[in-house]
Image (tube, rainbow, N blue to C red):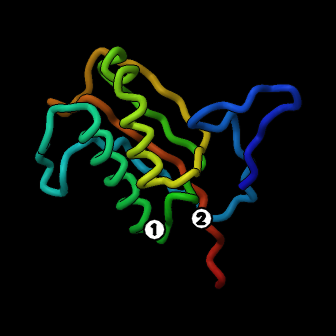
Amino acid sequence: MRTLLPAGWKEPVGYANGVEIDAGRIVFVAGQVGWNAEQVFESAELVPQFEQALRNLLDVLAEAGGRAHHVCRITAYCVDRPAYLAARRELGAVWRRLMGRHYPAMSMIFVADLLDHPARIELEATAVLPRNPN
């Protein structure tokens, strides 16, 4: 995977403007919210829900043999823009703990509501894994 940064552009913080992939196996991860494996929310707060949603995303990816560095795109849907902006430092710490310094192409979309209450954030992803050796 190669990060795309046009000449003269300021480097983005916490995401990539684009990525180039020499395609292998493509994995699409549906929107993951901050509930546990039993579909129970252990917190109504944004940061713990973000951490759980990201863990859920990585667990689904692992089922296909993927890891964090295989993620090439994440779309995040959040119901609370002020809370997100206020928690950016904490969210960044969670990101680095789970994803390291890997920053895929990302979009953040603020929405009025999410299907599963009391979800505050939902993450979906696309990943490209190496081709099978067969």
Residue furthest to the bottom in view is 134
For the N terminus, the quadrant is bottom right
Tell me where residue 46 appears, x and y as whole percent: 26, 31
Q: Amino acid at mark 1?
A: Ala
- In the picture, measured across the screen, residue 58 lies left or right of residue 129, that is left
From the viewer's perspective, is residue 129 above or below residue 102? below
From the viewer's perspective, is residue 13 above or below residue 27? above
Tell me where residue 106 appears, x and y as whole percent: 55, 35
Sequence-wise, the earlier of marks 2 and 1 is 1
For the C terminus, the quadrant is bottom right
Q: Secondary structure at mark 1?
A: loop
**In percent of the image, x 59 and y 37: which residue is there?**
15
- In the picture, measured across the screen, residue 17 lies left or right of residue 126, that is right
- In the picture, measured across the screen, residue 102 lies left or right of residue 76, that is right
**In percent of the image, x 58 and y 51: which residue is there?**
102
Query: Which disc number belongs to residue 10?
Result: none
Which residue was labeled with disc 1? 64
Q: Residues within 10 Å of mark 1 (few under 14, many from 20)?
A: few
**In percent of the image, x 60 and y 44: which residue is there?**
104
Tell me where residue 39 appears, x and y as whole percent: 15, 49
Q: Amino acid at mark 2?
A: Leu
Residue 16 position by quadrant: top right
From the viewer's perspective, is residue 97 above or below residue 89? below
Asked whether the beta carbons under mark 2 and mark 1 sit within 8 Å of each other, the answer is: yes
**In percent of the image, x 24 and y 41: which residue is there?**
48
- In the picture, measured across the screen, residue 123 lies left or right of residue 105, that is left
Residue 24 position by quadrant: bottom right
- Residues 84 and 40: in front is 84
Which residue was labeled with disc 2? 129
Spatial CA span between label 2 and label 1: 9 Å
